[in-house]
Every structure is written in structure tokens, then in C-alpha cells.
Image (cartoon, rainbow, N blue to C red):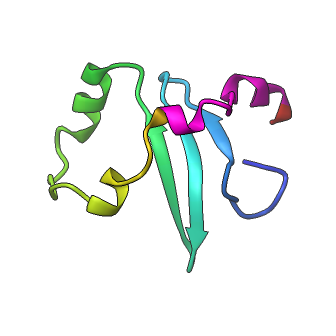
Amino acid sequence: MSDSEEPVAGDSYDHPDGKSEVVYLVEDGRVLTFREYPSVEAFEATVDGAAYRGIDEAVAGLPGREAFAELDLDDAEGDS
């Protein structure tokens, strides 16, 4: 975790199984993250037992990856 006691927006993690996760929002004791899987198969294996809830329109309306092109998470590796 970051140096703070609580997670904060932007905290970035690399999991041993190849997944990457970034804290997006911390509010009312809850933590919202975005997680990147190393493959479609890894994602499918993780969500296999989950209940599909449809499309979250707020998330679907977020800008694409190109909007974040200036961010380079690889440069942040030494900051942990």
C-alpha cells in the first residue's frame, strides 16, 4: 500500500498473477479500482463465478485509453 494509512486515488499495484490495479476513488469507506488482466482468458477465469450485471453507462462513457496516453505507469514503478 502507499505510505498513507488509507488507499488514495492513483495508488497503483502489480499483482503476482500479472494483473495490474489502480485505485480510482476512495469514498465512504469504499474503494473503487480499475484492474487490468494480462489476457482475456485471465479475465474470464476471474469473472467465471460472478453475476453479470450489464453495462454501467457511467463507466462506458469514460474516455478511451488514448485520453491517458501521457500517463506512463511504468515510470511510477520506482515510486512505490
x, y percentage for residue 41? 25, 21
Q: Is residue 56 left or right of residue 16?
A: left
> Count of labels shown?
0
The quarter of the picture where the C terminus appears is: top right
Residue 75: image location, x then y, percent? 77, 24
Query: Residue at the location (70% across, 59% down)?
Result: 8
- Residue 27, magenta (yes or no): no
* Residue drawn 17% across the image and 38% down it: 48
Q: Is residue 73 left or right of residue 61?
A: right
Above or below, comparing residue 69 to residue 9 in the picture? above
- Residue drawn 28% across the image and 35% down it: 46
- Name above or below for residue 67 compared with residue 78: below
The residue drawn where x is 40% and y is 28% is 37
Instruction: Give x and y (percent) for residue 60.
Output: 31, 51
Residue 23: give x, y in percent of width and height: 59, 52
48 to the left or right of 11:
left
Compare residues 46 and 23 and report the one nearer the observer: 23
**Image quarter for residue 28?**
bottom right
Q: In the image as oriented, which residue stretches furthest toward the bottom?
A: 28
56 lies above or below 47: below
Q: In the picture shown, does residue 57 fall above or below 37?
A: below
Evaluate whether residue 6 shows in this view: yes
Along the viewing direction, whichever of 56 and 7 lies nearer the viewer:
56
Magenta segment's dominant SS is helix
Q: Which residues are magenta?
A: 66-78
Q: Nearer the viewer, residue 51 or 68?
A: 68
Q: Is residue 1 left or right of residue 22?
A: right
Q: Is residue 20 visible?
A: no
